[in-house]
Amino acid sequence: MREAFAEAVGTFMLVSAVCGAALFSAAFPGNGTGLLGVSLAVGITVTAMAYAVGHVSGGHFNPAVTIGLWSAGRFEAGLIPKYVASQVIGGALAALVFYLIATGKSDASLGNFASNGYGAASPARFSLGAAFLAELVMTALFLIVIVGATSPKAPAGFAPIAIGLALAAIHLMIIPVSNASVNPARSTATALFGGGTALAQLWLFWVAPIVGAVIGGLLSRSLQED
């Protein structure tokens, strides 16, 4: 169960970065990190955890990545349920911890708890179609980066850096559109505390990233010799 535990810990840290940066930026104006800070927090966290436990589990921390790597021929189908369950549980526990922390301030306004959304729930009120397309395309590109950076012919030891930078760039691009998911476990974790709208819209942040990841994984088969 070491792989499952590593995935839970890595996803816990990733959701902690989202909550600690994005949630507190909204809840405590003037003390937050802003768009750039949130993006860097997520990218740096993924880089750090990939180095810390990537050698144990592969460092997915994301159900879409797990399924995308399967479509790329890099992961066994039989391990998908264990990985996805671990990621969702780890993310949910992180959201719970930060909910308890945030509610420790009596006048804190948690809003939608940094949840993803479209329409009125989008940071810049982008439509369902725009959010779906953004999540799908960015997750596909993310998988291409992951598969390429971890290829045997890629420079050794630099994969976590490339993956973390790609994730930071993705967040910079689409936080205004959907609050940037590309990760169903992250979306589920915050939606649990984000209210009815976040839960009602959660389907998109499972479907679009997974479809995008499968597309990215399949495209990577033609790009990478391995």
Image (cartoon, rainbow, N blue to C red):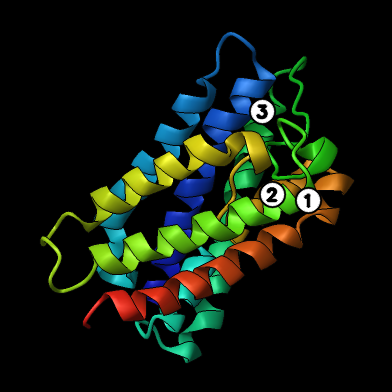
Residue 200 shows which numbered tag? none
Residue 144 to residue 125: above or below: below
Tag 2, which secondary structure?
helix
Tag 1, which secondary structure?
helix
Asked whether residue 106 is in view, the answer is yes
The residue pinned by badge 2 equals: 131
Q: Is residue 61 left or right of residue 187?
A: left
Mark 1 is surrounded, within 10 Å at the Cα level, by few (under 14), some (14 to 19) or many (20 or more) other residues, namely some
Quarter the N terminus occupies: bottom left
Residue situated in front as seen by the camera: 193 or 117: 117
Q: Amino acid at mark 3?
A: Ala
Tag 3, which secondary structure?
helix
Residue situated in front as seen by the camera: 168 or 185: 168
Q: In which quarter of the view is residue 100 placed? A: top right
Asked whether residue 92 is in view, the answer is no
Q: Is residue 70 left or right of residue 200?
A: left
Q: Amino acid at mark 1?
A: Leu
The residue pinned by badge 1 equals: 128
Q: Nearer the viewer, mark 3 or mark 2?
A: 2
Q: Nearer the viewer, mark 3 or mark 1?
A: 1
